[in-house]
Image: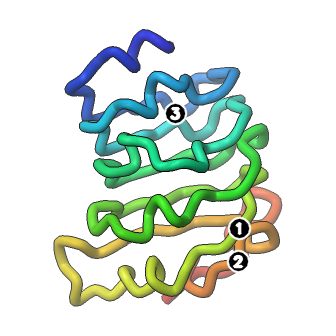
Amino acid sequence: PESLGKAKFLKDLRASGNQITGGIPISYYKLKNLEELYIDDNRMVGELPQTYEPFYDGLQELSVHTNKGIKGRFPVENFENTLRVKVIELHNTELTGQISENICGRLDPSLSYTRLKTITVDCDKVKCSCCTCYKDGKVVSTYP
């Protein structure tokens, strides 16, 4: 609900598998303390914000997979300079774009605290040299 955007200290929002419809409420973009956003496996539509928004700074886990109505370009530039993000799950959506080598480099196990653990995409829509690739909702290849 839109009203959650007023929860200044909200850190973890998990609303997976709830048949939620509509877009991500704009009020959520101001949640600068949000660390985990799980809105996967719903019926959501729209695009991820393309411009810098405060919630990108704190995000450690972003899961929007299995929302066929989520579309547009994945705003990779908003994840380039953060060392906090650990999970990016974008598969089974209509997102397009490219995951940069800079982000892929963060999968290095020696990075410990700042290590990115998971990136999932539909590789026919998002170019990525280090992602777990999906096609038609099924894993077709995994990154070692």
Q: Position of residue 70 (x, y in %)?
A: 71, 42
Q: Position of residue 86 (x, y in %)?
A: 34, 63
Q: Amino acid at mark 2?
A: Lys
Disc 1: which residue: 97
Question: Do tag 3 and tag 1 residues touch (Cβ < 8 Å)?
Answer: no
Indicate the colouring scheme. rainbow
Kindly identify the residue that appears in the image at 82 percent across and 60 percent down: 136
Numbered mark located on residue 127 in the image: 2
Q: Residue at position x 36%, y 69% from top?
A: 81
> Can you say whether 45 is above or below 113 in the image?
above
Horizontal side of 99 relative to 2 (left or right) equals: right
Under circle 3, the secondary element is loop
Q: Nearer the viewer, mark 3 or mark 1?
A: 1
Label 2 to label 1, Cα distance in Å? 6 Å
Q: Nearer the viewer, residue 143 or 56?
A: 56
Q: Quadrant of residue 25?
A: top right
Q: Which mark is residue 112?
A: none
The kind of secondary structure element at disc 1 is strand
**Which is closer to the viewer, label 2 or label 3?**
2
Q: CA distance from mark 3 to mark 1?
A: 24 Å
- Where residue 12 sits, quadrant-wise, is top left
Residue occupying image coordinates x 75% and y 47%:
71
Residue matched to label 3: 16
Earlier sequence position, callout 3 versus callout 1 = 3
Query: 27 and 88: which one is in front?
Result: 27
Q: Are marks 2 and 1 in contact (CB under 8 Å)?
A: yes
Q: What secondary structure is marked by label 2?
A: strand
From mark 2 to mark 3, how far is it between C-alphas?
Answer: 25 Å
Q: Position of residue 50 (x, y in %)?
A: 60, 49
Number of numbered markers: 3
Would you call the spot at circle 3 few (<14 residues within 10 Å), some (14-19), or many (20 or more)? some
Mark closest to the chain's N terminus, 2 or 3: 3
